Image (spheres, grey):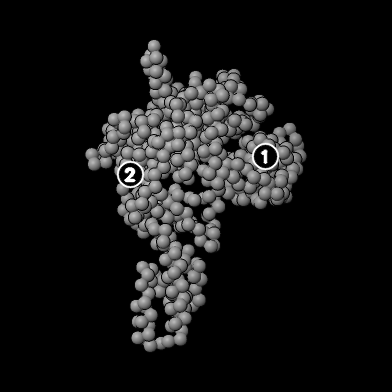
Amino acid sequence: MYRNSKHTVLFPLLLAAGVVAGLLLGQYLGRNSTTSQLKSMISRLTLPTNKLTYTLSLIENQYVDSVSMDSLAEHVIPLLVKELDPHSVYIPASEMQALNEPLEGEFDGIGVVFNMATDTVIVLNVIPQGPSDKAGIKAGDRIIEIDDSLVAGRRISQNEIVKRLRGPRGSTVRLGLGRQHIPDLVEVEVVRGVIPIRSIESAFRISGTTGYIKLGQFARTTHQELLQALAMLRAEGVDRLIFDLRGNSGGYLDQAILVANEFLHEGQLIVYTEDRHHKQVREYADGRGTAQEMDVAVLIDEGSASSSEILAGALQDNDRGTIVGRRSFGKGLVQRQIPYSDGSALRLTTARYYTPTGRSIQKPYTIGDEESYEEDLWHRYENNEWFTADSIHFADSLKRVTPGGKVVYGGGGIMPDLFVPVDTTDVTKYFVEVAGRNILYRYTIEYADAHRDALNAVRTIDDLQRLLDSDRTLVDDFVRYAARKGVAPRYGDIARSRKLIEAQLRAYIGRNTVLEDDGFYANIYPVDNVVMRAIELLNASDSSDTSDND
């Protein structure tokens, strides 16, 4: 069951019942014409939806022209749902696959990561043992033709390319590839198969005995992925964890509960939900978690919502670990996804959730005013909240106290234990221009082309770092490249932004290897002030524990 996205579960049932009543009314009207008979029938329709269904029935049976009722419903239902809370939403059948796919953990395709920065499909990575790997496709290949149709240089959208490459498992797609040092197209046939989608984007030992896990969303496979990541990190000697939930907008509630269970002790409350009838469902840790003794720092920001906030709130309210970063989004509503027969669905808010101390972290909203709700993050920026915690104020009525005596607040997201502002110290006009015009990223694509053999030989983060460390002219070469692309060097800006530019270059190049996002995050974290503060925090905690033991 999808429990993370807009008010009562009875709505579809009432609507269906109303439609049936409306059809009966239509038939009745066809046989009878007196005013008294009409009033008698209407008076017997006492369901809350009678006016709506009566109107729909009149349109269907008496309107002068024929009308597609399905088409009309597609327009009416979103308007109805818009009058509810900001997270109830109608999903047309045409959008269901795209919305559900990332949460289901797999799709059918050929198993490549590609980019179209130069109007040509460039294969950045090939999923090991996937369909493309078995067919002989290599990182650095250009996809020139798909099923004998030219796609290179045609300004075809990335979404269209995705449609052509994906298809039912077992079906075949023919590709014509451009490959370095090969004058003719390389023809391959790829049998499409199941491609896993990872919700854990990265997991590696970041420093000493500290591990790093980046969780992008709470998908159906998240808990299992976490267990595998923790086992891998422990094998490398990790006993402390940075758990990065920044930008994680949520997903399956049950997966957030399972993840929280790994860190909490038996009997500790994880979360509870409450519906319109005040019925509560409480979830407790079962004591079988594999990370109960692991020191943990959880990273959040204004993009962390829903299931991310459930996890952060569960650990914070149980005095388990430290929450680091900026105030989270503030979504404390639980949705149930209710399907329609045509493949569309309604994500309807059916309950509110509360953290273990009883906090509702749902930020305020006005029914029907989605625009103001969405502008809240911009208002936070305008109020300087991204840069100083002093601008954030909570009402005393929202205050709660954890078992360990820590004061926490509800009413608008999770406030971190350690606030870390946005760091713009090294962001100069030069950096904004080369990054904003995509010159920085395009350079890394060309760099990867020029060093493809060496990058394809990379197998570990240590391999990657040795390779990148050996290139002493990376930033200077990039500055010359940017100048050729129309951005003149500003040497004062370059000196100030040099560390940031170099980290970005190394990160994007790292993503062009088999390491994928591990290669990215292993190189970007030194300029990420939130991660660096978390490392300092865990190191200080370790030193304190050692002193106590002495």
Q: Horizontal and vertical percent for residue 314?
A: 39, 37
* 496 displayed left or right of 367: right
**Residue indicated by mark 1:** 130
Amino acid type, mark 2: Ser
Residue at (39%, 47%) from the top-left corner? Answer: 281
Residue at (32%, 50%) from the top-left corner? Answer: 365
Q: Horizontal and vertical percent for residue 5?
A: 44, 50
Amino acid type, mark 1: Gly
| Vertical relation: 525 (above or below) 303 | above
Q: Horizontal and vertical percent for residue 420?
A: 36, 29
Residue at (40%, 36%) from the top-left corner? Answer: 267
* 331 displayed left or right of 449: left
Of all residues, the one furthest to the left in this rendering is 396
Query: Which of the numbered marks, if any, corresponds to residue 360?
Result: 2
- Total marks in image: 2
| Tag 1 near tag 2, CB within 8 Å | no
Label 2 crowd (10 A; few <14 / some 14-19 / many >=20): many
Q: Earlier in the sequence, mark 1 or mark 2?
A: 1
For residue 374, say whether it is visible: no
Mark-to-mark CA distance, 1 and 2: 44 Å
Label 1 crowd (10 A; few <14 / some 14-19 / many >=20): many
Disc 1 secondary structure class: loop
Residue at (54%, 57%) from the top-left corner? Answer: 94
Which quarter of the image is occupied by the C terminus? top left
Disc 2 secondary structure class: loop
Q: Nearer the viewer, mark 1 or mark 2?
A: 2
